[in-house]
Amino acid sequence: MKHLAAYLLLGLGGNTDPSASDIKGVLESVGIEADDDRLEKLLEELKGKDLNDLIQQGSQKLASVPSGGAGGAPAAGGAAAASGGGAAAEEEKPAEKEEEKEESDEDMGFGLFD
């Protein structure tokens, strides 16, 4: 995936036919070592193909993938606030903040992008 991302970045930058050394340069600039076997396979698969056509074909394939259910349930609490339940809504807010703190403790101080 990292090789493809570098290929796409080069394509967006105007390099319509990136070489293996071009892709390695992009990856090394961010401290990633390229896998020569995967890089060569990627370049073989993309050789002679137009990047914009590939993106369009991929978008069409993604559009055909089912991605959702029958819709979401309406948010609860709207009717309570409208009927004068403002005090109840204020009491719920601190409880939500406490839940957020508990969720952040679950990752034991490690974030996804740390």
Image (cartoon, rainbow, N blue to C red):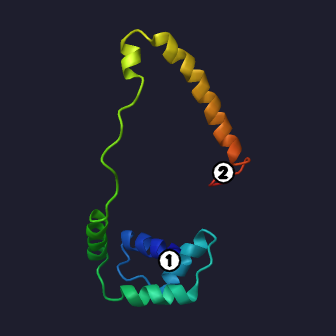
Residues 100 and 42: in front is 100
Residues 43 and 96: in front is 96
Q: Which mark is residue 22?
A: none
Q: Where is residue 113 in the image (x, y as percent from the top left)?
A: 62, 55
Q: Where is residue 91 in the image (x, y as percent from the top left)?
A: 56, 16
Residues 91 and 73: in front is 73
Q: Which residue is drawn at 37% across and 85% down?
A: 46
The image quadrant that residue 24 belongs to is bottom right
| Category of crowding for the residue at label 2, using alpha-carbon neighbours closer than 10 angstroms: few (below 14), some (14–19), many (at least 20) | few
Where, quadrant-wise, is the C terminus in this rendering?
bottom right
Q: Which residue is drawn at 61% across and 28% down?
A: 97
Q: In this view, does 13 lie above or below 102?
A: below
Q: In this view, does 90 lie above or below 33?
A: above
Q: In this view, does 102 lie above or below 108?
A: above
Left or right of residue 18: residue 24: right
Give the residue at mark 1: 3
Q: Which residue is drawn at 41% across and 15% down?
A: 81
Q: Which amino acid does label 2 sit on?
A: Gly
Q: Residue at x 62, y 78 (%)?
A: 33
Q: Which amino acid does label 1 sit on?
A: His
Left or right of residue 29: residue 44: left
Q: How far apart are marks 2 and 1 (CA)?
A: 25 Å
Left or right of residue 34: residue 18: left
Give the residue at mark 2: 111
Q: Position of residue 88 (x, y in %)?
A: 51, 14
User: Mark 2: which secondary structure?
Assistant: loop
Residues 8 and 55: in front is 55
